[in-house]
Image (cartoon, rainbow, N blue to C red):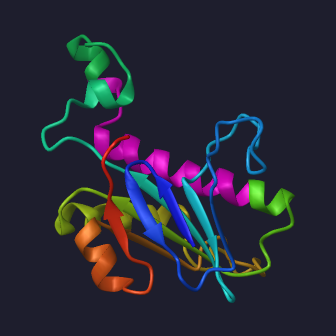
Amino acid sequence: MIVVADGYRFNFKDAINVFKFDETDPASQTFHGAPMKAVDIIAELSDVYLFIEVKEYPASYDPDAITGEKACSEIDCQKRPKHSEWLKNTLKYKFRDSFLYRYAEDKTEKPVYYLCLLNFDNALNSVMQKNLRNELPVGKASARWVKTLAQSCQVLNLEAWNRNFPKWPAQKVSAE
């Protein structure tokens, strides 16, 4: 099963179902219509759900351009969250909102693995993964919890994705 999202093509050969989850077309069966964030792709395998988020930034990016904020004064810039904090929060809330969507659809009976494909180097991805795992949270956050939200969270670049998930190859595709 092949799905294309945000400039990448994924092939989930062993999937039961795979689809673009952040659909913007109201006529699509996977359109949500609720004012919440959504991961890019959901793949349902026999034993797990994969929540997949794809983010790609230019090699030298301007945090103002990414966050959509205008140039700021020195005081305003000190108050604004740093880009890595903004990105971590974006990834965190995309997962949490998607989990709520799936809960409302009664589609949380399998463990959920969160996979983020970013175009950063391994060191930056490792830091993002550590920070994101702490805030999702991964595993049981409380002794009172019976279920986990995320069974696993991995942040990878394309090379690491294909090395770690050879059964689900991904490739960059040109804009059409």
Q: Hey, which quadrant is residue 25 in on the image?
A: top right
Which segment did they paint magenta?
Answer: 78-100
Task: Indicate the position of residue 36 as horizontal and vertical percent values.
Answer: 68, 40
Task: Indicate the position of residue 141 as horizontal and vertical percent values.
Answer: 62, 73
In which quadrant of the rendered image does the C terminus lie? top left
Question: For this rendering, which residue is in front, 144 or 137?
Answer: 137
Above or below: residue 79 compared with residue 142: above
* Residue displayed at 55% across by 74% down: 138
Task: Indicate the position of residue 43 as horizontal and vertical percent values.
Answer: 61, 71
* Residue displayed at 80% across by 79% down: 109
Decide if residue 92 is on the left or right side of residue 161. right
Above or below: residue 63 compared with residue 57: above
Question: For this rendering, which residue is in front, 142 or 64?
Answer: 64
Main SS class of the magenta portion in the image: helix
Q: Hey, which quadrant is residue 82 in on the image?
A: top left
In which quadrant of the rendered image does the N terminus lie? bottom right
* Residue displayed at 38% across by 22% down: 68
Is residue 47 in the magenta section?
A: no
